[in-house]
C-alpha cells in the first residue's frame, strides 16, 4: 500500500476548489465560494463561473499548498476533474493542472467528478492518530451501492469492485437537488434553497403529520399541520416504474401548482410565471412556507428511500456509500441510515459538508485509492500523454 501526496483540482461547476490529499487524509481543501456572484441570478451562470474560476485558480492552488504546509516538490501526482460538469468551467481547472504537471514534472490523473462524490465517504480528517487508512480498504466487501444526490445528479451506482461501476438508476429529468432549489426559489428562499428547505422542515417537524396514499393510479404524500389542520398534497414520483430510475420534474411542477393554488395565482405561460414570481408567493403565510418545505422534503426523499430498498433486495450489497450536496441534509442521511441498519448494511458518508458539496479533496482521494487498488489505472506521464487528456475515456457515471 502506497500513501501518495496528490494535489487535486475541481472546477466542474461553481466552486474553485484545490486540495492536498495524503493517502485518505485531507490535508487542505480550499473552496472559496462563488455564491456571491451567482446569488443575484438565482442560479449558476456558466460565463460568470468561468471568469470567477480564472480569477481565483492561481491563488487557490497557492493557498491550498500553503495551508497543507507543502511545496510542489512534496507532491507525487496532480489530479483534476475531467467531467462531468460545465465545459467552460472544467477547462479552467484542466488548463491549470496541465500547467503544473508540465512545470513540475508531475504525472497527471484525470478523474470523474461523480466517482469523487462516490468515494467521498472514505476521506479522513487530518489528524495524527488516524484509525482508518488505505490498508483498511482491503477489508471492504463488494458489491456495494452508491447513492449520489446533488444539484446536477441523482443516481444509484452498483460498485462491483474498486473502479468497477455500473449505473443502475438515474433521474430521467431534473435532479433531486435541482427540484429543491427551483421549488425553494418559488418560495423566495434564495439559491441554493436546499439547505434552507432542510432547516425549515426540521424546525417544523413536530407540527406535521404525513401519510402516504394511493390516489387514482399515483401515490401521494398527504401532509397536515396539526395546529392549523391545513392540508398539502404532493406526488411521490416514479415509484411504480419497475426500474431504479427517478423523475423530479413532475414534483417540481406539482409544487409550483400547489403554491399557485394556495395563493390563487395561476399563470397560463412560463413567461407570465417568471415575470410574476413574487406575486405567486405573495400572500403565503410564514407557517405555510414552513409546511410547504416539510411536505416537499418528504415527497422528494421518498422515491430515494423506496428505490434504495429495491436496489438492496436486487443486489444484496454489503455497504451503502452516500455522496453529493443533498447528503448534507441530516434528514436524508437519517432516512438512508435507517434503511441501511434494517438491512444490516455498513453506512458510509463524508465526515463534513465540505466533502458533500463540490470539492477537490474527493478528487485527490479517488486518485490515491485507485492508484493502489485499480489495475491499469490511467496516469498520464509524458508531455504527449498529458496533451491528450481529452482522449482519455470517461466513466459513464
Ligand atoms: O454536490 P453539489 O454541491 O453540487 C453539484 O454537483 O450539483 O450539490 C448541490 C445541491 C444543491 O441542489 C443544494 O440545494 C443541495 O445540494 N444541498 C442540500 C443541502 N445542502 C446542499 N439539500 C438539502 N439539504 C441540505 N442541507
Ligand atoms: Zn458535484
Image (cartoon, grey):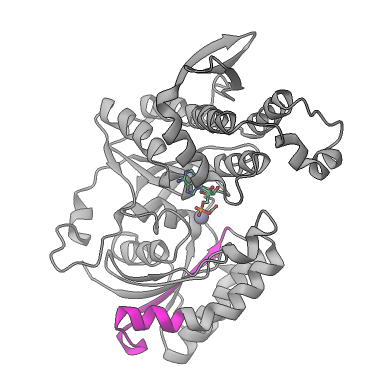
Side of 18 where 141 appears, left or right:
left
Q: Is residue 104 above or below residue 343?
A: below
Q: Horizontal placement of 2 versus 283: left or right?
A: left
Q: Residue at x 72, y 36 (%)?
A: 282
Indicate the quadrant containing the N terminus: top left, top right, bottom left or bottom right: bottom left
Residue at 50% x, 15% y: name it.
Answer: 212
- Magenta part of the chain: 61-84
Residue 268 placement, left or right of 23: right
Q: Position of residue 300 (x, y in %)?
A: 53, 32
**339 part of magenta stretch:** no
Residue 278 visible, this angle: yes
Q: Residue at x 68, y 29 (%)?
A: 259
Q: Image quadrant of residue 90?
A: bottom right
Q: 311 above or below 165?
A: above
Q: Is residue 379 above or below residue 155?
A: below
Q: How many marks?
A: 0
- The residue located at (53%, 32%) in the rendering is 290
**Is 66 in the magenta?**
yes
Q: Nearer the viewer, residue 15 or 343?
A: 15
Relative depth, front residue between 363 and 254: 254
**Location of residue 168 in the rendering, given as x and y in whole percent from the top left corner:** 49, 37
Along the viewing direction, whichever of 87 and 325 lies nearer the viewer:
325
- In this view of the protein, which residue sits in the foreground, 26 or 226? 226
Q: Can see residue 388?
A: no
Determine the image quadrant of residue 270.
Answer: top right
Q: Residue 174: x, y in percent?
A: 63, 40
Q: Position of residue 124 (x, y in %)?
A: 26, 60
Amino acid at each position: 500500500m502506497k500513501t501518495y501526496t496528490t494535489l487535486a483540482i475541481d472546477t466542474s461547476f461553481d466552486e474553485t476548489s484545490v486540495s492536498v490529499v495524503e493517502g485518505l487524509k485531507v490535508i487542505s481543501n480550499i473552496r472559496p465560494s462563488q455564491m456571491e456572484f451567482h446569488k443575484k441570478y438565482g442560479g449558476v451562470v456558466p460565463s460568470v463561473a468561468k471568469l470567477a474560476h480564472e480569477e481565483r485558480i492561481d491563488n487557490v492552488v497557492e493557498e491550498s499548498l500553503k495551508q497543507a504546509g507543502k511545496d510542489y516538490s512534496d507532491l507525487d501526482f496532480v489530479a483534476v476533474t475531467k467531467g462531468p460538469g460545465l465545459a467552460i468551467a472544467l477547462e479552467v481547472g484542466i488548463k491549470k493542472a496541465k500547467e503544473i504537471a508540465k512545470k513540475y514534472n508531475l504525472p497527471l490523473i484525470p478523474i470523474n467528478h461523480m466517482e469523487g462524490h462516490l468515494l467521498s465517504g472514505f476521506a479522513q480528517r487530518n489528524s495524527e492518530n488516524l484509525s482508518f487508512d488505505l490498508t483498511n480498504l482491503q477489508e471492504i466487501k463488494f458489491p456495494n451501492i452508491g447513492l449520489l444526490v446533488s444539484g446536477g445528479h441523482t443516481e444509484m451506482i452498483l460498485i462491483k469492485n474498486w473502479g468497477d461501476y455500473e449505473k443502475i438508476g438515474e433521474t430521467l429529468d431534473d435532479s433531486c437537488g435541482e427540484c429543491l432549489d427551483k421549488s425553494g426559489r418559488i418560495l423566495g428562499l434564495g439559491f441554493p434553497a436546499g439547505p434552507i428547505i432542510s432547516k425549515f422542515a426540521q424546525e417544523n417537524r413536530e407540527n406535521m403529520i404525513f401519510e402516504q396514499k394511493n390516489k387514482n393510479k399515483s401515490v401521494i404524500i398527504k401532509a397536515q399541520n396539526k395546529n392549523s389542520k391545513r392540508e398539502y398534497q404532493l406526488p411521490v414520483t416514479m415509484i411504480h416504474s419497475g426500474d431504479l430510475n427517478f423523475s423530479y420534474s413532475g414534483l417540481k411542477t406539482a409544487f409550483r401548482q400547489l403554491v399557485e393554488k394556495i395563493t390563487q395565482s395561476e399563470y397560463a405561460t412560463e413567461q407570465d410565471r417568471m415575470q410574476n414570481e413574487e406575486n405567486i408567493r405573495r400572500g403565503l403565510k410564514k407557517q405555510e412556507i414552513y409546511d410547504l418545505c416539510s411536505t416537499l422534503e418528504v415527497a422528494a426523499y421518498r422515491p430515494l428511500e423506496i428505490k434504495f430498498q429495491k436496489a438492496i433486495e436486487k443486489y444484496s450489497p454489503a455497504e451503502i456509500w452516500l455522496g453529493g450536496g443533498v447528503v448534507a441534509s441530516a434528514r436524508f442521511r437519517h432516512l438512508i441510515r435507517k434503511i441501511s441498519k434494517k438491512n444490516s448494511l455498513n453506512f458510509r458518508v463524508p465526515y463534513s459538508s465540505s466533502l458533500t458539496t463540490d470539492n477537490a479533496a474527493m478528487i485527490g482521494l479517488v486518485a490515491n485509492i485507485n492508484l493502489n487498488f485499480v489495475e491499469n489505472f490511467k496516469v498520464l506521464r509524458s508531455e504527449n500523454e498529458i496533451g491528450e487528456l481529452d482522449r482519455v475515456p470517461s466513466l459513464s457515471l
